[in-house]
Amino acid sequence: MHPPFITHPPFLIIAIDGGAASGKSSTARALSERFNLLHVDTGSFYRAITAELVRRGIAPEDLDALRATLPALAPGTRVEGRAARMEIAGRAPAPAELRGPAVNAAVSHFAAVPEVRAALLAYQRGQAGVARAHGFRGLVMEGRDIGTVIFPDADLRVFLHADPEERARRRALEGQQDSIAERDRLDTRRKTAPLAIPPGATAIDSTHLTLAQVVEHLSALVAATSPPPAA
Ligand code: DC
């Protein structure tokens, strides 16, 4: 028996990792538009969980409270345009809350706790099902451990760098104050799933590149990864 003809292009998974303000979100958003992919910003998931825990007055050191609370959060996903947003109890926190100073200061501390990461593992992998259910051709997921832990078999693994001064400049242009260096230090040194270049990843230093140049480069790699099906 021959296998049936494949009439749809294969489901595509692109993993983008990198430090704070390294250009992940802009790059992932552009790729999601060009290739009809669900854009999954896992940093926003860690931020949503952090906002909820901060609201409940739970500290990252309070493992008993985390163990009691995390399983009950049971987050859902709302798709807005091409972006996945986490909902907790039917509510998706506003972007201003997710990017505010309280969450900026706490998120890397919560993200270093293995219980928090474990609570998000299946949720993040489940975004492939969300993308399929919404008719996307695949997903582009950005974070710190996507190519190393969440989707190590992704069709394309990318690691973005940029000089610290350039990253601070980008955040300032967005009107945000963010302790980039401190978060990078915590994210790189933690024991569980630290920020690292995934094996086989394409590493790009975007310090002197425009967004369009990064996107063109990656688009060529995506196109080479998944040639259109033969007629
Ligand atoms: O991408 P971001 O700066 O919005 O991410 C916020 C924090 O979430 C970041 O400092 C570390 C954590 N994070 C993580 O540990 N693993 C991910 N896959 C994504 C984010």
Image: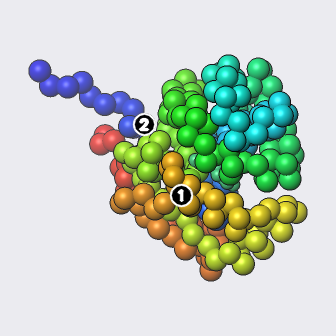
Front-most of residues 85 and 32: 85
Judging from the image, what secondary structure is the residue with disc 1 in?
loop
Residue 183: x and y, percent? 69, 60
Seen at 58% across and 35% down, the residue is 115
Residue at 71 percent across and 65 percent down: it is 182
Q: Nearer the viewer, residue 23 or 210?
A: 23
Instruction: Write the residue at 51% across / 48% down.
Output: 192
Number of the label disc, if any, that sits on residue 195: 1
Tell me if 117 is positioned left or right of 21 in this view: left
Q: Which residue is at 61% across, 48% downward?
A: 112
- Mark 1 and mark 2 lie on one chain; the one further toward the N terminus is 2
Res. 110 in view = yes
Crowd band around label 1 with a 10 angstrom C-alpha radius: few (<14), some (14–19), many (20+): many
Of circles 1 and 2, the one toward us is 1
Q: Quadrant of residue 69?
A: top right
Q: Which mark is residue 11?
A: 2
Q: Is residue 24 left or right of residue 177?
A: left
Residue 227: mark: none
- Name the amino acid, label 2: Phe
Does 136 sit above or below residue 113? above
Label 2: element kind = loop
Q: CA distance from mark 1 to mark 2?
A: 26 Å
Q: Is residue 83 visible?
A: no
Q: Position of residue 62 (x, y in %)?
A: 71, 36
For ligand 1, tell me if the residue under mark 1 lies within 8 Å. yes
Q: Quadrant of residue 79?
A: top right
Image color mode: rainbow
Is residue 173 shown above or below 53?
A: below
Badge 1 amino acid: Leu
Corner quadrant of residue 23: bottom right
Tell me whether the residue at label 1 lies in contact with that at label 2, contact meaning CB atoms closer than 8 angstroms: no
